[in-house]
Amino acid sequence: MYLPRTRSDCYLFSVLAGSLSVVVVMYLCVGTEYRNIVPSGANVSEWRQFRDKIKLTVSGEGAARTVAILMVLHLAHILLCLPMMHVTKVLYGFLLGPLCGGALCSAWETLIVLVYICSLHISRNQAITALVESSRARHILYFELACVQIASLPLHVAATLVSFGGVSVCEFMLSHTVVTCLMSFKDTLVGGVLSGDPSPRTIVYIGVLLVVSTVLPTAMTMYLSVRGFVEVVRTIHRDKVQEEDKGGEYALSVQDDGPGKPASHKGRDTTGESELLAGDVSTGRVY
């Protein structure tokens, strides 16, 4: 079993355990309430009721105040692991339209993540570094970084690739920016459509799209979990083989140098033997 051995290992485990614990708590406390408010299927009447509630809220609070609240919620989604971030992005599009809402949403999220990534303390970890180097050698690093951005992983967990695995800030932010723009504009497009008077068929399409948006991160999370588990097992096995090889070499050296055994030939001066074997070249005799 892999146990933390160094200070870097302990810090990595504390980050992973702490982040995942917060995700579970937030999901249990907030996720249930979100599911009671936001439709999760393709029921036309439920989506129309949801749209009417949003319009009523915006008219009471004001558009500018509502956008400010959305930005604070967005910050909580990223840093405090608040679930259902795609719903907040849908509301960006509902209030500001698909283009303006998508641009503000993408820029705000990219800025938050960039500030967080640049503030990280870099400390290499053997298991995470091995995972990153394996992806780099197989030329799939950017693909797997994109999977990390899509997956249902907190930023604190994804950022361990930078703080412990040797992924550069540019590599991480490039993949993050591309995925963020695609996912954000997809959600704000849904919000823009809902702000009008969509047909029942359009609402069904929206419901299916949001269901896929929920399933895809789960699938990416499962892929990354299996991939990480396999790589950690390989690293542990490789370390164990290396330790066994070192132990075998040490046992052989002790056996050779033990009582009643010939001394080791390491460092022995063989100059005289070489001269005897070479013989006297001038007379043609070889001893």
Image: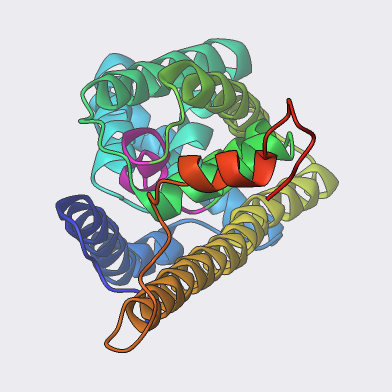
- On whether residue 203 falls in the magenta region, the answer is no
- On whether residue 161 falls in the magenta region, the answer is yes
**Whole-percent x, y for residue 94 in the image:** 52, 28
* Closest to the observer, 54 or 144: 144
Q: Main secondary structure of the magenta part?
A: helix
**Whole-percent x, y for residue 37 in the image:** 42, 59
Q: Residue at x 64, y 35 (%)?
A: 136
Q: Is residue 52 visible?
A: no
Which quadrant would residue 29 be assigned to in this image? bottom left
Residue farthest along the right direction in this orientation: 201
Q: Is residue 164 visible?
A: yes
Q: Residue at x 79, y 48 (%)?
A: 205
**Whole-percent x, y for residue 60 in the image:** 27, 30
Q: Residue at x 35, y 19 (%)?
A: 114
**Whole-percent x, y for residue 160 in the image:** 35, 43
Q: How many numbered marks are there?
A: 0
Q: Is residue 239 above or below residue 254?
A: above
Q: Which residues are magenta?
A: 152-164
Which quadrant would residue 127 be assigned to in this image? bottom left
